[in-house]
Amino acid sequence: MKKAYRLVHDENLCIGCQACSVACRAENKIPEEVYRLQVTVSMRAQDHTMDFTRRSCVMCDNAPCVEVCPTHATFQMRDGIVLVDEKRCVSCKYCALACPYGARYTDPLTKALQKCDFCYSSRILKGELPACVEVCPTDALAFGDINDPQSAPALKLKNNVSIYPKAHLGTKPKVVIIPNAKGMPRE
Ligand code: SF4
Ligand code: SF4
Ligand code: SF4
């Protein structure tokens, strides 16, 4: 059966420690001036509680960046993972303009438009978790195939209210948010 990968971010368990972002940088050798993954921190004025928001590629099933890429440098695997072939990228930035999540960045060395790939080649194909999920100290992140009802993301999603970011756009993200229960779900 085709895999249905999900990466779940439970905002209630997140402490904003940035271990995920640091692990991503090390795993994928990301230059200092850019990032594939950030967890931003904001404070609510009314009660001084913190919100932690994960910012990265949400790995759309219906990916606008794939649709617009003129050279097929951005392409999709059969299991839905969207990848970038840097050798084919001509830096036209169409993908960055099409992405509703602001997920693309220009690699300062190769000039290719890059993004998170769930550590596809370096970890997923070896049966390992993405680096961010591996290091998260609070289990705020869960990754796996939700066709397996016992997988970590399936169990998390079974017991919690969840949202798919900007679901109204029809992009069908594979990143799912369990929103901070102290407030309303955000886009
Ligand atoms: S490692 Fe986990 S707890 Fe720390 S910022 Fe990332 S998601 Fe949140
Ligand atoms: S979030 Fe942006 S970069 Fe990632 S697959 Fe969707 S459109 Fe492409
Ligand atoms: S910048 Fe590269 S990956 Fe993005 S649309 Fe152009 S050729 Fe494709």
Image (cartoon, helix red, strand yellow):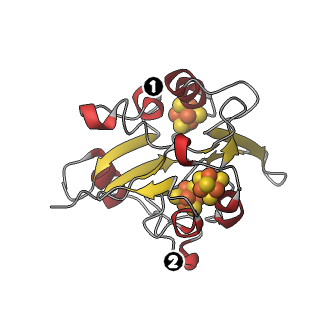
Which residue is at 36% across, 35% downward? 121
Q: Do labels 2 and 1 touch, CB within 8 Å?
A: no
Please provide percent x and percent y for residue 4: 29, 59
Judge whether 106 appears above or below 178 on screen.
above
Please provide percent x and percent y for residue 184: 64, 65
Residue type highlighted by circle 2: Gly
Q: Nearer the viewer, mark 2 or mark 1?
A: 2
Which residue is at 39% across, 53% downward? 81
Which residue is at 19% across, 56% downward? 149
Q: Tell me the residue that label 1 is attached to.
A: 135
Choose between 3 and 55: the one closer to the eye: 3
Check the image and name the residue furthest to the right: 45
Check the image and name the residue furthest to the top: 26
CA neighbours of label 2 inside 10 A, class few (<14), some (14 to 19), many (20+): few
Please provide percent x and percent y for residue 119: 42, 36
Q: Estimate the spatial distance between the alpha carbons at disc 2 and disc 1, rounded to whole Å.
A: 31 Å
Quadrant where the N terminus is found in the figure: bottom left
Q: Tell me the residue that label 2 is attached to.
A: 170
CA neighbours of label 1 inside 10 A, class few (<14), some (14 to 19), many (20+): some
Sequence-earlier tag: 2 or 1: 1
Total numbered circles:
2
